[in-house]
Image (cartoon, helix red, strand yellow):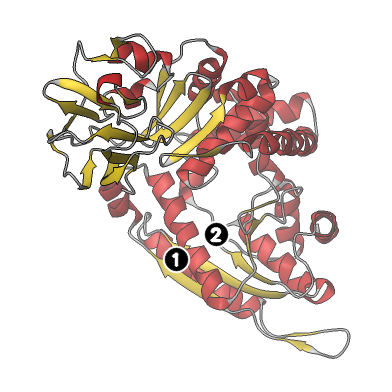
């Protein structure tokens, strides 16, 4: 087993020389075996070892028993160690923590297992930071990997899920990932090392335990060595996933910021092979949500159909208060902010006004034929302007063009539907003198050589 673990560490470069590793120890067979093997390998591989135990306080006296056992094991079996070069390695330090997982789960409204994992990893990460550890080592074995893969397979999964548990991710390493549970048990027996049994591991009410106790033995009986071979298959699938994700990353880099979210050409996504397109969408959502978040296949496929479709204003509601919207040729991923306050009111002439999501600046200037734009334009010096949203029946006639309803102009100019109801309309005596995104109406456009109102509209910083 030493050789299996050592070869895997070297092959994956899991523990570079000079690193400091925090070993997570529950007291169970896997974690005790991992701690002891790393304790034996630290001199040969040139790393520093410390350990940590988290008491979830879920099993009463049994949880406290496990903590006392880990404390005694580390003290008795992981003391100062003489090396072949006549040096002395220090005893392995143990850091402990605890939390009321059951109470926290009720408070968060989450499952006990999920809450326990989050609290345990929070403790491990804070402890690693406090002691200066480069890596956190957890005792996931080849069997754990197989159980994870079979669980994902049963639920339905792509390459990402079928790749199982990665050897390294987010500062966590798994040195036992190619070691079987049988190897662990044989090692503990030959080394005469004690360990604790968690009574919940025998409860087949947990899905993972049913896979472990009922499914895996059948598969091993049909094909001896199944766990090891499936672990090898998972490694190949992870390599395929890395390759596809790198291609998707190149595509995702074409996205640009857009009103608190992201925008990308829908055609770019639609034209990509489906495996790359779906991964690109997942990466974009991860960027928007602040991490590589899991997103269900249902949502990813809906996003892909949104890109492949022709509806110019279609949308999909996503988790984390996010909307995906088509804005003609663009795919927009935007935070769902809810209704934006919008009050009808006079525009200061001159002055500044924040209306809904827009910031409007009005100054008095003489007009000398400057280009009239949709967001930066000049109106004749009318005595008053009211700012309001568009109304049904509003008409608009740009200079040199025929008149139409404001709605038709906004559609023709490909203004995204979600913006149309919050665009400021500059009303003079009940008529639309100008519309944000369209510019001034012909009847109210400034005349060359005369005083005019110079109006500039930009998204509000908020």
Residue 232, x across and y down, in percent:
80, 38
- In this view, the residue in front, 158 or 361, is 361
Does any portion of residue 357 appear in the rendered image? Answer: no
In the image, is 376 to the left or to the right of 133?
left
- Label ID, residue 241: none
> Callout 2: 10 Å neighbours few (<14), some, many (20+)?
some
Q: Which residue is mark 1?
A: 65
- In this view, the residue in front, 327 or 412, is 412
Sequence-wise, the earlier of marks 2 and 1 is 1
Q: Which residue is mark 2?
A: 196
> Callout 1: 10 Å neighbours few (<14), some, many (20+)?
some
Q: Quadrant of residue 387?
A: top left
- Residue 266 lies, with reference to residue 151, above or below; the image says above
The answer for how far apart the CA atoms under marks 2 and 1 are is: 9 Å
Residue 41, x across and y down, in percent:
79, 70
- In this view, the residue in front, 409 or 39, is 409
Label 1 secondary element: helix
Label 2 secondary element: loop
Label 2 close to label 1 by CB (< 8 Å): yes
- Residue 48 lies, with reference to residue 152, above or below; the image says below
Q: Which residue: 66% across, 77% down?
A: 78
Residue 215, x across and y down, in percent:
62, 28
Q: Which residue: 54% across, 24% down?
A: 155
In the image, is 28 to the left or to the right of 243?
left
Total tally of numbered discs in the picture: 2
Q: Which residue: 75% across, 49% down?
A: 179
């Amino acid at each position: 087993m030493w050789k299996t673990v050592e070869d895997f560490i070297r092959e994956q470069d899991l523990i570079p020389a000079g690193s400091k590793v925090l070993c997570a120890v529950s007291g169970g067979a896997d974690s005790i075996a991992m701690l002891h093997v790393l304790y034996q390998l630290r001199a040969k591989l040139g790393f520093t070892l410390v350990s940590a135990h988290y008491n979830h306080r879920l099993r009463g006296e049994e949880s406290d028993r496990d903590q006392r056992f880990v404390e005694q094991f580390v003290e008795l079996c992981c003391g100062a160690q003489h090396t072949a070069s006549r040096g002395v390695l220090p005893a392995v330090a143990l850091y402990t923590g605890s939390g009321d997982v059951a109470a926290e789960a009720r408070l968060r409204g989450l499952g006990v297992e999920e809450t326990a994992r989050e609290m345990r990893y929070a403790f491990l990460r804070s402890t690693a930071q406090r002691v200066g550890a480069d890596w956190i080592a957890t005792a996931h074995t080849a069997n754990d990997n197989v159980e994870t893969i079979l669980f994902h397979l049963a639920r339905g999964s792509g390459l990402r899920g079928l790749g199982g548990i990665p050897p390294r991710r987010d500062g966590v390493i798994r040195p036992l990932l190619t070691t079987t549970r049988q190897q662990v048990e044989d090692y503990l027996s030959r080394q005469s090392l004690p360990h604790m049994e968690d009574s919940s591991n025998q409860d087949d009410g947990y899905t993972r335990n049913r896979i472990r106790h009922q499914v895996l033995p059948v598969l091993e009986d049909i094909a001896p060595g199944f766990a090891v071979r499936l672990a090898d298959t998972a490694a190949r699938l992870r390599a395929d996933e890395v390759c596809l994700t790198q291609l998707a990353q190149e595509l995702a880099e074409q996205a640009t910021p857009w009103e608190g979210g992201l925008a990308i050409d829908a055609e770019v996504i639609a034209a990509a092979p489906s495996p790359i397109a779906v991964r690109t969408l997942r990466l974009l959502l991860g960027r928007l949500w602040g991490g590589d978040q899991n997103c269900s296949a249902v949502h990813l496929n809906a996003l892909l159909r949104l890109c492949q479709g022709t509806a110019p204003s279609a949308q999909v509601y996503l988790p984390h208060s996010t909307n995906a919207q088509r804005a003609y040729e663009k795919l927009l991923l935007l935070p769902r902010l809810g209704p934006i306050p919008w009050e009808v009111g006079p525009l200061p002439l001159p002055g500044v006004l924040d209306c809904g999501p827009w910031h409007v600046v009005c100054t008095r200037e003489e007009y000398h034929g400057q280009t009239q734009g949709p967001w930066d334009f000049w109106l004749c010096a009318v005595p008053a302007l009211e700012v309001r949203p568009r109304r049904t029946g509003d008409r608009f006639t740009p200079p040199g063009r025929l008149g139409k309803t404001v709605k038709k102009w906004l559609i023709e100019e490909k203004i995204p539907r979600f913006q149309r109801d919050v665009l400021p309309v500059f009303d003079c005596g009940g008529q639309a003198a100008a519309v944000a995104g369209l510019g001034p109406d012909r009847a109210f456009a400034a005349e060359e050589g005369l005083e005019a109102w110079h109006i500039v509209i930009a998204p509000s910083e908020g």
